[in-house]
C-alpha cells in the first residue's frame, strides 16, 4: 500500500495540500470532507487500488489512517 498515493488522492479530492495530510488527519473535522466528498474519494480509491469498499466500512473510516489500513487489509 502506498500511503503517498492515498494522501495525493485525498488531497486532490478535498482540495487540501497532501503535505499537510497525516495518518491522524480526520476526514470530516480536519480535512472538511462532507458525505459527497467521501463517496467520490472512495470511488477514486476503489478505481486506483482495484478494490471494493463495503458501505458499512465507509462509515467506520474517520481518519486517513483508517482508509490506509482498510486498503492494506483488503489488498492482501
Image (cartoon, rainbow, N blue to C red):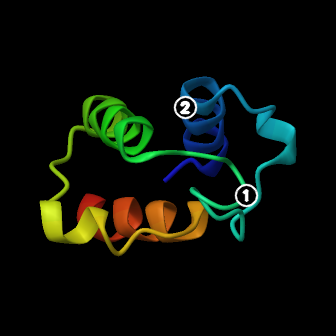
Q: Which residue is found at the position 28% from the left and 58% from the top?
A: 75
Residue 9 location (% of width, % of height):
55, 31
Tell whether 27 sits left or right of 21: left
Tell whether 11 sits left or right of 20: left
Q: Element at badge 1?
A: loop
Tell me if mark 1 has few (under 14), some (14-19) or many (20+) residues whose alpha carbon lies within 10 angstroms of its own. few
Tell me the residue that label 1 is attached to: 30
Tell whether 25 sits left or right of 41: right
Q: Nearer the viewer, residue 46 or 13?
A: 13
How many numbered circles are shown? 2
| Residue that protrudes farthest toward the right in the picture | 20
Q: Which mark is residue 9?
A: 2
Examine the image and state in which quarter residue 30 appears: bottom right
Do the residues bearing badges 2 and 1 touch, measured as CB atoms within 8 Å? Answer: no
In the rendered image, the vertical position of residue 61 relative to residue 43, given as above or below = below
Residue 37 location (% of width, % of height):
43, 36
In the rendered image, the vertical position of residue 42 relative to residue 29, given as above or below = above
* Pointer 2 or 1: first along the chain: 2
Q: Which residue is found at the position 55% from the left and 45% from the top?
A: 33
Examine the image and state in which quarter residue 50 appears: top left
Q: Element at badge 2?
A: helix
Task: Answer yes or no: is residue 76 visible.
Answer: no
Tell me if mark 2 has few (under 14), some (14-19) or many (20+) residues whose alpha carbon lies within 10 angstroms of its own. some
In the rendered image, the vertical position of residue 31 relative to residue 70, given as above or below = above
| Label 2 to label 1: alpha-carbon separation | 16 Å
- The quarter of the rendered structure image containing the C terminus is bottom left
Task: Answer yes or no: is residue 65 visible.
Answer: yes
Q: Which mark is residue 12?
A: none
Which of the two marks, 2 or 1, is nearer to us in this view?
Answer: 1
Residue 73 location (% of width, % of height):
32, 71
Residue 70 location (% of width, % of height):
36, 68
Q: Nearer the viewer, residue 2 or 19?
A: 19
Amino acid at each position: 500500500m502506498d500511503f503517498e498515493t492515498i494522501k495525493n488522492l485525498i488531497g486532490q479530492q478535498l482540495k487540501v495540500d497532501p503535505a499537510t495530510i497525516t495518518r491522524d488527519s480526520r476526514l470530516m473535522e480536519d480535512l472538511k470532507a462532507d458525505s459527497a466528498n467521501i463517496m467520490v474519494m472512495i470511488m477514486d480509491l476503489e478505481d486506483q487500488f482495484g478494490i471494493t469498499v463495503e458501505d458499512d466500512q465507509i462509515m467506520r473510516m474517520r481518519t486517513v489512517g483508517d482508509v490506509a489500513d482498510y486498503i492494506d487489509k483488503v489488498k492482501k
